[in-house]
Image (tube, rainbow, N blue to C red):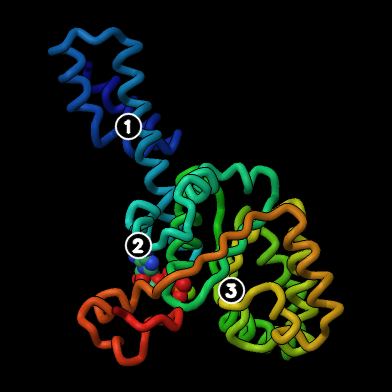
Amino acid sequence: MSDLSYQRVQQALQTLKLHRIPDCLDHLAEQAASHSWTYVEFLDKLLEAEVAARTEHDIFVKTRQAHFPFVKTLDQFEFAFQPSVNEKQVRELAAMRFVAHGENVLLLGPPGVGKTHLAIALGLSAIMQGLSVSFVSMSDLLEQIARDAKTDRLNQRLQLLGRPRLLIIDEMGYFPLDRRAGQFLFQLVSRRYQKGSIILTSNKSFADWGEIFTDSVLATALLDRLLHASHTLNIRGQSYRLKDKLKAGVFTELGTPDGRKEG
Ligand code: ADP
Ligand code: MG
């Protein structure tokens, strides 16, 4: 390639914002010559490098925007430890058809059984497939609601939480919701209904949701929308956090979390 055309190519790549190709142009051009690639094969390799770099950047940006409290994948989940979790069902959910159909996922179970881990892992699968994800814990959401109510910004918050294709709301049930928070949550679920999926985790079974809400009519209406098209995973079993301690016998006197004495 003449110096002049080389410079023009570099200039054009800048203009077209193809930022990865300049790094690998020389190397790939050499490979093309030594392996006698066709022109199309060469172009294919250049574009492949650009697309790979963009995908990686997109995943990085979306993961940062999601605000996960930690990053854990499905491959890091020991299904053998938690037999009540159906691996096949989780892997099917990871294919994200539920998001395409605007369905919800509810992960229920006691502390430490992996609800947040699974929610984040599914969130990451969504990001890998190019979907936008947002994660919020119920306690953070309650703080945001209280703050936004003071500055009259609840509507903006509602819009913001309406945007991502997948919204993860973690730890419903640890705190009671006052009337305003209950109404906000109802509006949020209604706004996303059949359009934007929600993954919700809770330590409470649906029967106990009345206790979380001040208004049981509102709780019923919200559950109605949330459950209409949904996948519920009831996780029963031991806390993974206590796994090693259980093994070491620290909890034998107290019995296991599900009330059994370790034998
Ligand atoms: P929960 O949200 O149900 O309270 P977490 O998802 O926060 O539980 O899990 C607690 C910790 O244990 C996390 O670090 C999580 O990655 C890990 N964990 C839970 N279950 C499993 C599992 N089956 N395999 C691997 N790690 C697990
Ligand atoms: Mg959790």
Indicate the position of residue 101 as horizontal and vertical percent values.
69, 44
- Residue located beneath label 1 in the image: 49
**Of 56 and 9, which appears nearest the observer?**
56
Quadrant containing the C terminus in the rendered view: bottom left
Q: How many marks?
A: 3
Image depth: mark 2 or mark 1 in front: 2
Q: Is residue 207 above or below residue 160?
A: below
Residue 18 quadrant: top left
User: Is residue 91 left or right of 81 when viewed as pictured?
Assistant: right
- Is 55 positioned to the left or the right of 1 in the image? right
Q: Quadrant of residue 16?
A: top left
Q: Which residue is mark 3?
A: 202
Tell me the distance, in whole angstroms, between the alpha carbons under discs 2 and 1. 40 Å
Residue type at numbered disc 2: Phe
Q: Residue at x 36, y 34 (%)?
A: 50
Q: CA distance from mark 1 to mark 3?
A: 42 Å
Ligand 1 within 8 A of label 2's CB?
yes
Secondary structure of the residue carrying numbered label 2: helix
Q: Are marks 2 and 1 in contact (CB under 8 Å)?
A: no
Mark identifier at residue 238: none
Q: Residue drawn 34% across and 52% down?
A: 75
Q: Residue 130's x, y, as percent?
A: 51, 44
Q: Nearer the viewer, residue 165 or 90?
A: 90
Does label 2 or label 1 sit earlier along the sequence?
1
- For residue 81, the mark is 2
**The CB of the residue at mark 3 lies under 8 Å from ligand 2:** no
